[in-house]
Amino acid sequence: MSDDDKPAKATTSHDIAVPPWLQEFIARDWDDAPPMPHPARPDLAPHTAARRARLSQHYPGIVVVIAAGAAKTRANDTDYPFRAFSAFTWLTGETCQDAVLVLTPIGDSHQATLYIPEYAPPGELGYYASRQGALWIGNVPTPSETKAILQINTRGRASLQADLALLRETPTRSVSGLDPALDELLPQAICGDLNRVLDELRLVKDDWEIGRLDAACQATARGFADVVRELPRLIEGKVARGERWLEGTFWRRARLEGNEVGYTSIIGAGRDATVLHWWRNHSEVADGQLLLADVGIETDELYTADITRTMPVNGSWSAEQLKVYQAVQQAQAAGIDEVKAGADFLAAHRAAMWVLADHLHSWGILEVSADVSCGDDPEAPGAGAHRRYTLHSTSHMLGIDVHDCAKARAENYTKATLQAGHVLTVEPGLYFQTNDRTVPQELRGIGVRIEDDIVVTDGAPRNLSASLPRDPAEITEWMREVQASEIEL
C-alpha cells in the first residue's frame, strides 16, 4: 500500500479530521481524473537514451541509481519549489520530485527503469485528503503516459523498494543526499566517482541541448526588455525598492516562458553593481546610475541562460561610466575571440584580463603595465594586481546548471582544450568600490560586467545572447526603442 492509499491523518496543526461518514461520501460518484499530458518535448527521448548509454559504459555489471530528489522544507510545513537534480533530468527528461532512475546491468549494458510517484485515483481517500493528492497539487502523468513520451520503462514509485531488494547483492552506485527515503533503501550503495563521471559526460552539449540554451537566451533577452521598459517609472521615484521591482519584472517573464529563473537574479544599481553577487536587490534605482543586471531564464527542460548587461538608467552615459564600460567591452571582445576549438579553456580569461590590466595601468590605478607578469602566475598581467578590481574569473561552463559540470576534474574543465559543443560564458568586469582609496574619486561606485553565452564550434564562436546589444550607443538606442514599444507576450 502506498502512502497515498493509507488513511489520511492530520499532519499539521490546522488539519481537520475526515470522519468515516465523510470518507464514505468522498469515495462515491467520481469520473476519471482529467488527464495530465507529460510536459516533456517529444523530440527529447533519443537524446536521453544516448546519454544513458554513455553512462552505462562506465559501470559494467554495476547498478546505478540516481534520484530526482525530494522536496526541501522552507519553513514548518511549506517547501521550496521543487527543482530536480540536474544529472537526473539530463538522463531522463523527467523533472518531477521523488522520481528515481535505476540502471540495471544486463550483459555489457543496462536496462533503464524510471520510477515516478503515482497519486491516488478518484474514489480513494488520498485523492481528496493527501497533501500530495491530485486535488491538492493537480493531477500528474501516469507511468504509461510518461513512458510514451520519454521512451523509457516506467513504473510507480511504490514498486521501487521490492525491485531494489532484488538487486541488493549487486554492486551499486548512487548519489546520496538527494532523497532520504531512497538512501535508506540503499545502505550498500556508494557514490564513488559517479558525480564526476556524470558532470564530465555533460560537458559537451549536443545539438538538442544547444537549442534549449538558445531558447533560454532569447527568452532572457525579452526579460531584459521588460526590465528596461520599467526604468522610467523608477526614475520618477515611484518605487522605493526599485531593484526588487525589476527583479520581479524579470521573474514574471521567467515564469511565463520557462520554469523559473536559473539562479537568484542580480539587480545592482549604482554602487550595488560593485558587489559581485548582489542578491538583496533592495535599493532604489535612481537617475544617473548604472544598472547591472545578471539574470537568466531556465527553460522547462532546466537549461539556463546567464547574461549580464550594464546600462545607464536614464539612457545616457556619463564620461566616467562610458570610460569603464568601453574597457570592459574591449576585454570581453578579446575574450570571445579566443573561444574556439583547440584553444585552452583559460585563453578567454587571459585575453580579457590583459585588456583590463592595460586600461587600469593607463588610468594610473595599476603601477605596472599589463606586460609585467606575476611571480605566482607567469600569465597574470599587471603582476596580478588587477584582480583587486575584477574579483572573478572570466568564464564558466553553462548548461542545465548555471555553473555547469562543477564536479568535473580540472584536466577536463579549467585545464582542458575547448572542443565543439562546449558552452561557456565570457564575462569580464570592473568593480570600483566606494571606499577604495587606490581608485580615482570619479570612478568609485562604478561597477560594469558584460556577459554572453558562447558556443564553441569548429569555426567562429557562436554567441547565443547576441540579440542583446553590447555597444554603448546601440544599448541606449535599444533602450529608447524598447521604452517606446509594447510588452511582448
Image (cartoon, rainbow, N blue to C red):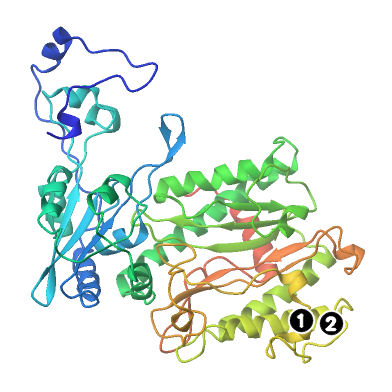
> Is the residue under label 2 in contact with that under label 1 (CB below 8 Å)?
yes
Which is more toward the observer, 270 or 287? 270
The image quarter containing residue 338 is: bottom right
Mark 1 and mark 2: Cα distance apart in space? 6 Å
Q: Which residue is mark 2?
A: 361
* Res. 329 mark: none
Residue type at tag 2:
His
Element class at badge 1:
helix
Element class at badge 2:
helix
Q: Compared to 443, does 143 lie above or below? A: above
Q: Position of residue 109 (x, y in %)?
A: 13, 74
How many labels, in total? 2
Q: Which residue is mark 1?
A: 357
The image quarter containing residue 482 is: bottom right
Q: Position of residue 218 (x, y in %)?
A: 45, 61
Q: Residues within 10 Å of mark 1 (few under 14, many from 20)?
A: many
